[in-house]
Image (tube, rainbow, N blue to C red):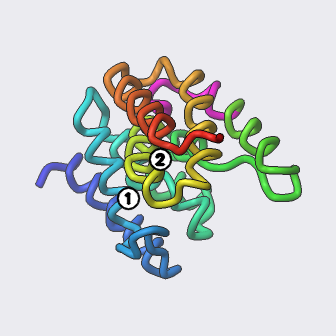
Amino acid sequence: MSEVDLRIQAAASFAFIAHERVGQVREYTGEPYINHPAEVASIVESVPHTPEMVMAAWLHDVVDDTGVPLSEIRLVFGDEVADMVSGLSSVSVLADGNRALRKEMELKHIAVASPQTKTIRLADIISNVKNIAERDPSFAVVYLHEKARLLEVLNDGDALLWESAYILVHEGLASLPKNP
């Protein structure tokens, strides 16, 4: 195994252990949470990428969901990976206001992120929106509109992923029941 492969495997293992330690599972399916970062990493690998992007894809939810501090990601995986994970991590907390205000903060945060970080966020959107309309139509109304707005600031991420995310979000929106 090459050094690069070992570093990516280390990020995958770190993410697996962190998510497993807190007992995190996917909300609608109950499947192991690690399947989501694995899918995001695979999507990132399908377009031009760096090893650091793949590592950050594996780690993108660790800070928000498992209590691992960003400083630990920085210490173990370096500044470049930590900076991408930081760009993908929440900057808002419940005390910052309602969901709309918090999502606006998140949008401004990712808007200034690197194109590499935005590419990972696009892969995350693709992974998350595929079945939301059928699994939770009432939440999908809010969620898909948030993602459509987010796409407006992700246009300097990978173009193919942006197009895929755009199609998935808008197909999801079109599939929702219309208000009478």
Residue type for callout 1: His
Residue at 31 percent of width and 52 percent of height: 39
Q: Which mark is residue 115?
A: none
Rendered location of residue 89, percent (x, y) = 61, 49
In the figure, is residue 52 to the left or right of 18?
left
Badge 1, how many Cα within 10 Å: few under 14, some, many 20+?
some
Outermost residue toward the front in this view:
180
Check residue 52 for magenta coloring. Answer: no
Between the residue at mark 2 and the residue at mark 1, the CA separation in whole angstroms equals 23 Å
Badge 2 marks a residue whose secondary structure is: loop
Task: Choose the circle earlier in sequence order: 2 or 1.
Answer: 1
Q: Which residue is mark 1?
A: 36
Magenta residues (range): 109-119
Outermost residue toward the left in this view:
1
Badge 1 marks a residue whose secondary structure is: helix
From the viewer's perspective, is the residue at label 2 or at label 1 nearer? Answer: 1
Q: Quadrant of residue 45?
A: top left
Rendered location of residue 56, percent (x, y) = 43, 47
Q: Quadrant of residue 13?
A: bottom left
Check residue 111 for magenta coloring. Answer: yes
Q: Quadrant of residue 83?
A: top right
Rendered location of residue 55, percent (x, y) = 37, 48
Rendered location of residue 111, percent (x, y) = 63, 26
In the figure, is residue 66 to the left or right of 169?
right
Residue at 37 percent of width and 41 percent of height: 52
Q: Which residue is mark 2?
A: 78
- Label count reads 2
